[in-house]
Each structure stands twice: as C-alpha cells, then as structure tokens.
Image (tube, rainbow, N blue to C red):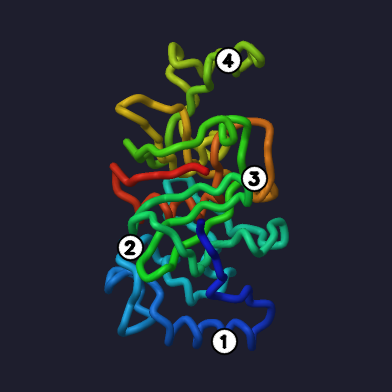
Amino acid sequence: MKKEQDLSSVPHNEHELKTRRQFLGTSAIMAAGLLSACSSNPRASLPDASPSADLSQPYEVMYGPLPDEQFPLPAIDLSKINSKFLRREVSYQTDEKVGTLVVDTHNYYLYLIGENGTALRYGVGLGRAGFEWSGRAIVARKAVWPTWVPPEEMIERQPELTKWSWQNGGMPPGPENPLGARALYIYQNGRDTLYRLHGTAEVWSIGRAVSSGCVRLLNHDIIDLHRRVPPQTPIVVI
C-alpha cells in the first residue's frame, strides 16, 4: 500500500509564492543535476523535462504559454482546474522502482516515482478506456503531436469519424487532435493495449471521468512527462 503526502502547498498570493520558492529551493527536489537545480543535494534521479521543470516556479510560469511548440499553446487558465491536480512533488511510499509510472484511476492521479519516497504527481482525466484496463506494461513508444486513429468500435458509434480511420490515414496532429501535444503508447507482452497517456486542451476534464479516451493530462503536463520518461518505462495502472 502506498502513502502520499504533498510536499508543496499551492500558492495563493505573492508572499506564499516567495515562501514556496524558498522552501523548494532549500529542499532536494529531483533530477540529480539534470533538473533546474533547486538544491545541492537532489533526491530523485529523473531526467530534465523542460524550462518548466523547475518545480519552484509559480504555476503561472509552469503553465504559461509555449510559443515554440509546433502548434503554439496558450497559457492554461488555472481558474478552470482544481489546484490539487496541478503538477507537484509529493511524498509517495511504494515498492515500485524509481522511474515507474503509476496511474491511480480512483483518485485521478499519475505518479512518476522518484527516490527516497518521493514522486512527481500529475492530475489526469479518464475516459471509458482509462477504466477498462489495469495491470503492468511498458511505454513502448512516444509521439510528439501524434496522429489520432479512432478505434473501430468508436467509428461504429460515430460514423462521421470514418474519415479519420486508419485506412484514411488518421486525424493529423494539431490543436483539435484528441491526443493533444504528446502521447505515450502502452504495450503489454509486445502487444498494443490501446491504452494511451496523452494531452488535452480540455482543462475542465482533469480530475473527472469523461466520455471517451484513456488517460489525459494537461498539454503542459504531458509535454513535461514525455521528456522525463524514456521508452521501456514500466507503468502500473491500479
């Protein structure tokens, strides 16, 4: 069984932002010299992710505009999401190895396990497929601004999606693509589970069960996660 404790408070004003930055600057966060250094004694050996990888930054910066993306992303309206689902480091006691991904479908969280009982936690939204599969697998491949191919059963329910079938080449990447800015493809025993971790621009859907899809993260968060995890990363869905 795991036990979790939040290691950072959600900033609500300028004084709290300064206090949070000072606290995180003196605590060992992540990344063994690869993350933007906040401490001379880092705890977690996780690869650097992006300019927003520094968890000491205020959320307005962490979730600010990303103009250099292939399809530039605007800043996220933080008023549209419960602050508990924003990216943060937490205490997380588990027997899983460092670097493992853990999807907690009950609480709508995804954890990237760090060292010394820590994890980087992301809020997620779950579609039907997100509840239908559980177990152990690996991230077999990763994609930047992926093409989306709706499953055949979805096309049967929504014939208008036929134009995006695999025979027709799928839906091109872009802001309207349901997979968002990045996707991680989950395989088990060499076979595609059809389970995906992917981005979304639908901020309101994080922390909720939605009509379709697998595990969705904010586009900013899936970009961050995509850069942290290599292929063959183990994943556990509970």
Relative vertical location of residue 20 with respect to residue 172 in this rendering, above or below: below
- Asked where in the image residue 188 lies, by quadrant, the reply is top left
State which tag comes first along the sequence, 3 or 4: 4
Query: Which label was assigned to residue 46?
Result: 2
Residue occupied by mark 1: 18
**Amino acid type, residue under disc 1 in the picture:** Lys
Mark 3–mark 4 contact, CB under 8 Å? no
In the image, which is nearer the foreground, mark 3 or mark 4?
A: 4
Q: Secondary structure at mark 2?
A: loop
In the image, which is nearer the foreground, mark 2 or mark 1?
A: 2
Residue occupied by mark 4: 153
**Amino acid type, residue under disc 3 in the picture:** Glu
Mark 3–mark 2 contact, CB under 8 Å? no
Q: CA distance from mark 4 to mark 1?
A: 51 Å
Mark 2–mark 4 contact, CB under 8 Å? no
Residue occupied by mark 3: 202
Q: Tell me if mark 3 has few (under 14), some (14-19) or many (20+) residues whose alpha carbon lies within 10 angstroms of its own.
A: some
Residue at point 51%, 68% (across, down): 90
- Residue 127, horizontal then vertical, whole percent: 62, 35
**Amino acid type, residue under disc 4 in the picture:** Glu
Residue at point 42%, 46% (across, down): 70
